[in-house]
Image (cartoon, helix red, strand yellow):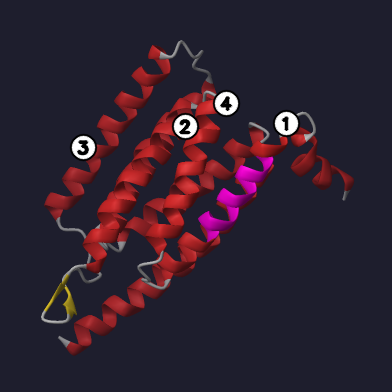
Amino acid sequence: MNQISNFFFETYQNRETYLIILEAIAFVFGIASVVFAKRENILVYPTGLVATIITVYIFLHDELMGDMMLNFYYSVMSIYGWWNWSRKKEDKYVVPISRTNNKEKAIGFLMFLITMVVTYFVYKAYGTTIDSSNYIDIFTSGVFFTAMWFMANKKLENWTLWIFADLITVPLYAYRGWGMFSLQYLIFTILAIQGYLTWKKSLNKQKVTA
C-alpha cells in the first residue's frame, strides 16, 4: 500500500502547489470529457478544452514538447469538433457516427507520419535530449493526433486509436513520475473501450433504421 501511495505522491513533494492543483483540475475535466465523448454529448469539447489548455501549460513548464504540442492540437481540434458536432440541417445533426473510408484512412496515416516528424524536430529545436521515452512520446503523438481528428468527425475508429495509444501512455507517464496522469490514462483506456462499444451499437442501429 505504501509503494502505491509513494508512486502517486512522492514525485509531488517538491512540486509547486499551483502545478499540482492545475494537474488535478485537468485530471477531472479530462475524465469528464471522455465520458461525454462516450455518450456522444457535445460537452466533450468545452470540458476537453479546459483540460487541454491546462495540460499545455504544465507540459510546456516541464519541457515535454511532444505532449505539449499534442494538447495544443487537442485544443484547436476541440474548437473544430465543437462546431462540427453541433452543425444541424433541418433540425438533424449533419455529422453522424460512421466508419472511415479508404481515403480517410490514408489521410489519417499521413497525419500520423507528419505529426511524428514535426514532434521530433520540435524536440530538436528546443535542444531537448531525445531518449527512448521521448521516441515513444513521438510515436503516441502521431496516434493521438489522428485519433482526435477521427473523433472530431465522429469516426468509430477514433476509439481504437485511443485505446492503443492510451495503453502505451499509462506506463510511459508512470516511468516519468506522472502518477496522476498515468492513472488518468488508465481510466481513459477503460472509457475508450466502453466508448467503442457504445458507438458501435449506435452505428448498428443507424444501419437497421436506414
| Disc 1/disc 3 C-alpha distance (Å) | 38 Å
Q: How many marks?
A: 4
Q: Who comes first in sequence, dot 2 or dot 1?
A: 1
Tell me what residue is drawn at x 44 percent, y 68 percent. 36
What amino acid is at disc 1? Arg
Q: Which residue is mark 1?
A: 15
Residue 24 falls left or right of residue 204: right
Q: Secondary structure at mark 1?
A: loop
Q: Who comes first in sequence, dot 1 or dot 3?
A: 1
Name the residue furthest right.
2
- Whether residues under marks 2 and 3 lie with C-beta atoms below 8 angstroms apart, the answer is no
| Disc 4/disc 3 C-alpha distance (Å) | 29 Å
Tell me what residue is drawn at x 78 percent, y 41 percent. 9
Q: Position of residue 34 (x, y in %)?
A: 47, 61
Q: Who comes first in sequence, dot 4 or dot 3?
A: 4
Q: Residues within 10 Å of mark 3 (few under 14, many from 20)?
A: few
Which tag is nearer the camera, tag 1 or tag 3? 1
What amino acid is at disc 2? Asp
Looking at the image, residue 209 lies above or below residue 150 = below
Q: Which residue is mark 2?
A: 137
Q: Which residue is mark 3?
A: 110
Q: Magenta stretch: dominant SS?
A: helix
Q: Please state the extent of the stretch shown in magenta in the rendering.
A: 20-31
| Disc 4/disc 2 C-alpha distance (Å) | 14 Å
Which tag is nearer the camera, tag 4 or tag 2? 4
What amino acid is at disc 4? Asp
| Disc 2/disc 3 C-alpha distance (Å) | 18 Å
Q: Which residue is mark 4?
A: 62
Tell me what residue is drawn at x 63 percent, y 31 percent. 176
